[in-house]
Image: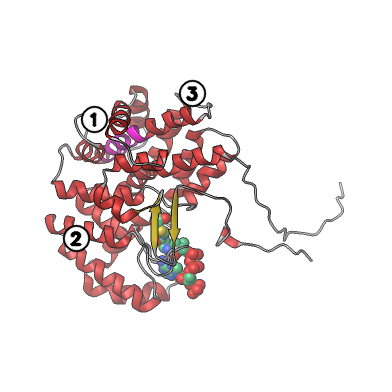
Amino acid sequence: MSTKTVHKGLAGVVVDTTGISMVNPETNSLTYRGYPVQDLAAHCRFEEVAHLLWHGELPTPAQLAEQNAVERAHRELPADLVSTLLHLPATAHPMDTLRTAVSILGANDPHEDENSPEANHAKALRLFGALPSIVALTQRRRRGLLPLPPRPDLGFAENFLAMTFGAVPEPEVVRAFEISLVLYAEHSFNASTFTSRVVTSTLSDLYSAITAAIGALKGPLHGGANEAVMAAFEEIGTADRAQEWVARALAAKRTIMGFGHRVYKNGDSRVPTMRAALRTVAELRDGQRLLDLYESLAGAVFAAKGLHPNLDYPAGPAYHLMGFDTPVFTPIFVAARITGWTAHITEQLAANSLIRPSSLYTGSAQREFIA
Ligand code: CMC
């Protein structure tokens, strides 16, 4: 009889240390490098938060200007990448397009296999600059529109939205979008970040780690939940139908997307900030029906199961009201989380140990082989 204990899903298992972010379910808080995420969302540009995650400190004006110059130079996608992406089926899921694009960028990078902190930071900035352009191209292609050139005169969030929709929207919408990017940037050892650290621990390259992380994020139990939330909203339709829908969904043992969390059991600390951003966008974009549905579904899920919403719950309808198609929601999450993933890759390499857990074997006992 084995004495091994199985930690299914690695729940509660502490596998390493990190100095990047802390999720504290007791105080219901999330900090990036010590700063509460709500304060960063309220006061910082996304580019400043990226610097904080990568370097441990908020940037000086000179450091920010230097980082911005490199990021903006990478917004222009290589022509061969654009041409390959335009050959993918227009029906491909945007997460598949993004995963493929990162793989192509890796194959085209002569420094792909260099794993020094400097080389990997250069790759992180390359992806940081390029990912919004890829997401924008994908969103436009879904509507039969040609890609637009980047706007080097604009900040990260404004350029992302201008490349997608052809113009910078209302400042309140830009701000709400930027808040979502800050909230999505980092979240400790979640499934996709852990995936990127597993790949990195074999001394593989950063692009491979990010490609794998995108695959992990796509699933509806993780980042794909923001898309699944919108699908549920569309299925329910109006606020008055939420309670009955929840009762039927739970009776059918369905998972209600956008609710529950592996670490937070008393509510996700990011939700109030994103919910306020959703309200702002809803007021500007005729979103009262969606807001009513939001509140009614949240109330019904809590009453029936005691589950709180997670960040994907307000983010999904906010992106919808901003004008994004549902399958583009999780790629936006990627464009934000690239900061956290790449910070973790650097941290993993700084004190690397191959991540290779054990298992408890439950198959056939050893038996005689008869040729
Ligand atoms: N809908 C219905 N039941 C749920 C849900 C849900 N969303 N979440 C948890 N439960 C149930 C679960 O089935 C279990 O019930 P029982 O005890 O009767 O078997 C109970 O609640 C406890 O769940 P748990 O096992 O402690 O949850 P977990 O830590 O294994 O799972 C989770 C966490 C996020 C995978 C799960 O809550 C879930 O599937 N949520 C929906 C998907 C989702 O919104 N994911 C986004 C996560 S956060 C942001 C991000 O990464 O993008």
- 49 and 10: which one is in front? 49
State the residue lying farthest toward the top.
110
Q: Is residue 191 left or right of residue 167?
A: right
Residue 261: x %, y % from top left? 43, 63
Question: Which image quarter is the N terminus in?
Answer: bottom right
Helix, strand or loop for disc 3: loop
Check if residue 135 falls in the magenta segment: yes
Q: Tell me where the magenta segment starts and ends, as one range.
A: 128-139
Residue matched to label 2: 279
Q: Disc 1 to disc 2, how far (Cα)?
A: 29 Å
Residue matched to label 1: 150
Q: Disc 1 to disc 3, how far (Cα)?
A: 25 Å
Helix, strand or loop for disc 1: loop
Instruction: Tell me: residue 121, above or below residue 343.
Output: above
Residue type, mark 3 in image: His
Q: Residues within 10 Å of mark 1 (few under 14, many from 20)?
A: many
Helix, strand or loop for disc 2: helix
Q: Disc 3 to disc 2, how far (Cα)?
A: 44 Å
Residue matched to label 3: 111
